[in-house]
Image: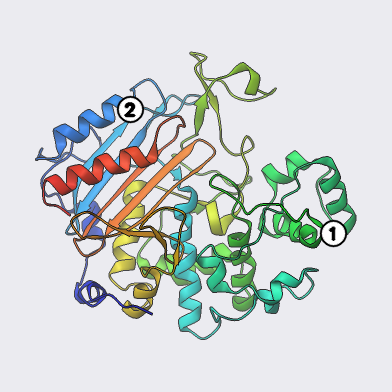
Amino acid sequence: MKRYNYICAVARRVLCIAAVCLCVASCSHGDPYANLPECEITAPLDSILSGLFADDAPGAHVMIVRNDSVMYSNSRGMAAFDTDDRITGATMFNVAESSKSFSVAGVMKLVEEGLLDLDKPVREYFTEMPTAAFDTITLRHILTHTTGLPNVIPQNRTEWETLQSKVPLHFARLRDYIHYGREEELTLSYALLDSLPADRKAPVCGDMDLPFMLIKQIVESVTRLPFDQWMEKSVLSPAGISNVAYRDPDVTINGLAHAYSTFMPEKARHGMYVSPDGKWIEDDYGDSPAFLTKADNGVYTTGREFLRWRTALEAGKVVSPETLGMIYSPMAPTQFPDVWYGLGNLITTTPSGAKKVYQLSHNGGFYILDVSFPEKHVSYIVFSNRREWSLPRLMKEIDSLLEANNWI
């Protein structure tokens, strides 16, 4: 497997995680949690964001870190209409598929400890699952999105009734199963695998990542601890990270943003929250699937805390430099030119030759972009709580701005 020289350089850097929060370097604007002087990227990035996110609408928090210092921090828009809270650097967002960064680190820590093997069939952890596919699929397949499994979530009444006849379920309605099911419940859909139509396709962008949901149960089976408890003890605590939460209907997350999409009468259902101006409808837990699945989409945190996490991970606080090299190595091609799957992330190279590790995803109305250029010691996040804008376009604009100023 190909190794990258930058990993050694990353490992030698002794990073202070607190610097991500406390070190003030050269540029920011408009965030009450940062009062940084302006620099070469401030005005153009402010212009880009003001064109996307209005102050009286759902918005975004954007932060850029360079050489362990916060270089840019800007928050725009409303975090929650029902409480009239605005987005700040302390707002908690669901980070969608960027949750996988934490889960992959946890899995790889268990690989280092000899408790997991990337190339063993997952049948070892799911002995009662009635599908032959589990005899050949491995953890490596799951982490690189190469299981080849079709989307097995029931898509009609017949499939739902078939699943009900095969496994014990606590849900009477398919919609409730999809919106409120946890990993151990949703993955029971694999009982349908051998009876689905032969042309059933693999999940596409926006579908639930059912294979990745298996991670929670695999971790719990070898650690004998609840997933979030083990993650807190063995992954988050060594990284010095505390402001991270998994969604639980019985637990209040302070500073939580709600997610929204543009109000359309034909999509509204009874009980859905509509903003006072009638323009936005809540698109969040209970309105969209997979908010209770912890391994693939479940993390809530702030932009600042996520970049602290990235800094700690790349500093070797959680896994070894060799393991980080595996996580950041291209493993399998995607459908996009020159973009590869790493372990739970996407990897490409910029026009200037810089390695780029990133994730862009959405969960309900949460639109999330996290990007690292590990060789250049530059990372940034865009955490947004609204739909109807282009993640790839904004990523391209920010990358171009950073490249034009020789940051990457």
Picture mark count: 2
Residue in the image at 79% along x and 41% along y: 156
In this rendered view, identify the residue nearer to me: 334 or 265: 334
Q: Can residue 33 be seen at all in this image of the molecule?
A: no
Residue that protrudes farthest toward the bottom in the picture:
114
Residue 117 position in % (x across, y down): 55, 82
Q: Is residue 340 left or right of residue 405?
A: right
Q: Is residue 65 left or right of residue 301?
A: left
Q: Quadrant of the N terminus?
A: bottom left
Colour scheme in use: rainbow
As drawn, the label of residue 395 is none
Q: Is residue 305 left or right of residue 217?
A: left
Q: Quadrant of the C terminus?
A: bottom left
Q: Quadrant of residue 147?
A: bottom right
Residue in the image at 28% along x and 43% along y: 396
SS for callout 2: helix
Q: Give the residue number, with chain letter if any, for mark 1.
A: 167
In this rendered view, identify the residue nearer to me: 196 or 115: 196
As drawn, the label of residue 52 is 2
In this rendered view, identify the residue nearer to me: 154 or 315: 154
What's the residue type where badge 1 is placed? Val
Residue 35 position in % (x across, y down): 17, 39
Residue that protrudes farthest toward the right in the picture:
165
Residue 189 position in % (x across, y down): 75, 56
SS for callout 1: loop
What's the residue type where badge 2 is placed? Leu
Label 1 CA crowd tier, 10 Å (few <14, some 14–19, many 20+): few
Up the image or down, 10 lies above or below 101; here it is: below
Residue 61 position in % (x across, y down): 33, 38
Q: Is residue 265 left or right of residue 380?
A: right
Residue in the image at 51% along x and 66% along y: 143
